[in-house]
Amino acid sequence: MPRHKSRPSLPPLALAAALTLLWHAVLFAAAELVPSQDAPHLGATLITLCTLPVPVLAALAMGGWRHTGFAPIRTGVPGFGVTVPLFLVGAVYAVPGVEGDGRTLVYLALFCLAVGVTEESLSRGVVQHVLARMGRLPAAVWVGVLFGLGHALSGAWFGRDLGDTLFQVLSTAAFGFGYAAVRFHLATIWPLVAAHALYNFVQYASPGAAPWPVQLGVAAGFVCYGLWLLRRLDHRSIPDEEAPAPAGAR
């Protein structure tokens, strides 16, 4: 019988970039179409949730939930301890306290949770799964770069200050790299979702932005911690994300 020709596939970086662009295209379209809401942060939450089908459908197309991080891989023990520094970073931004009434803070928490779910399912979920075949360090670097450039797109679309946008690109790229390194130690994205949500919440609820030396220190910390975590994985032959998914895995 004649063999079926395999379908040509995009290079990992091209596919990862395409997924990132598609996610942001949905975000920007939703920002134009979702009506404004009276409740604080509710409109932003609904807009953000509109992007969730992009990583969900991509995960299904890639063969299931486990290797894209939506569900834990049953083999091995997840190293949740590596996420502790991510939660401690939130304590740095929480030092000045939070401001806002209870209702506003609840809606803000929901918004930050939506951002954590959608951004982690995209970047440390399907995008990192695609890039993992490049190797751990290149994958983590490109996850960070694409995460930072995504924030550049958002800054340009929503008309944010250029200087603030450039600083955010650098800080989010460092954030994305550090989170990608942690992701290689985990069987699931959900601890990262929680840490990401807390990180955003304490920043948005803070009475003022942290001084730029503190923000630079946090960004450098993400990079250094990520490099250290990747070195710890050197003794492993195949990281979880690079392992081929079992046939029919869902």
Image: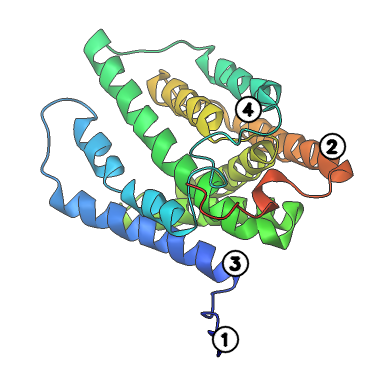
Which residue is drawn at the image coordinates 49% and 25% (left, top)? 194
As drawn, 112 above or below 52 = above
Is residue 79 in sight in this rendering? Answer: yes
**Mark toward the viewer: 1 or 4:** 1
Q: Residues within 10 Å of mark 1 (few under 14, many from 20)?
A: few
**Circle 2 sits in a helix, a strand or a loop, which is it?**
helix
Of helix, strand and loop, which one carries label 4? helix
* Disc 1/disc 3 C-alpha distance (Å): 25 Å
User: Which residue is disc 2 drawn over?
Assistant: 232
Distance between mark 3 and mark 4 Cα atoms: 35 Å
Q: Residue 237's x, y, as percent?
A: 84, 49
Question: Which residue bears the numbered disc 1?
Answer: 3
The image's colour scheme reads: rainbow
Within the image, what quadrant is residue 19 found in? bottom left
Between 167 and 195, the one lying in front of the other is 195
Which three-letter amino acid code belongs to the residue tagged 2? Arg
Q: Helix, strand, or loop for circle 1?
A: loop
- Within 10 angstroms of label 3, few (less than 14), some, or many (20 or more) residues? some
Checking the image for residue 214, the label placed there is 4
Q: What crowding class fits label 4: few (fewer than 14 Cα within 10 Å), some (14-19), or many (20 or more)?
A: few
Left or right: residue 13 versus residue 199 is right
Among numbered discs 2 and 1, the one appearing first in the sequence: 1
- Give whichever of discs 3 and 4 has the lower sequence position: 3
Q: In which quarter of the view is residue 36 placed?
A: top left
Q: Position of residue 104 (x, y in %)?
A: 25, 17
Tell me, yes or no, whether the two marked residues, 1 and 4, touch with CB atoms within 8 Å: no
Structural distance between the alpha carbons of marks 3 and 2: 24 Å
Q: Is residue 248 above or below residue 198?
A: below
Q: Which residue is mark 3?
A: 12
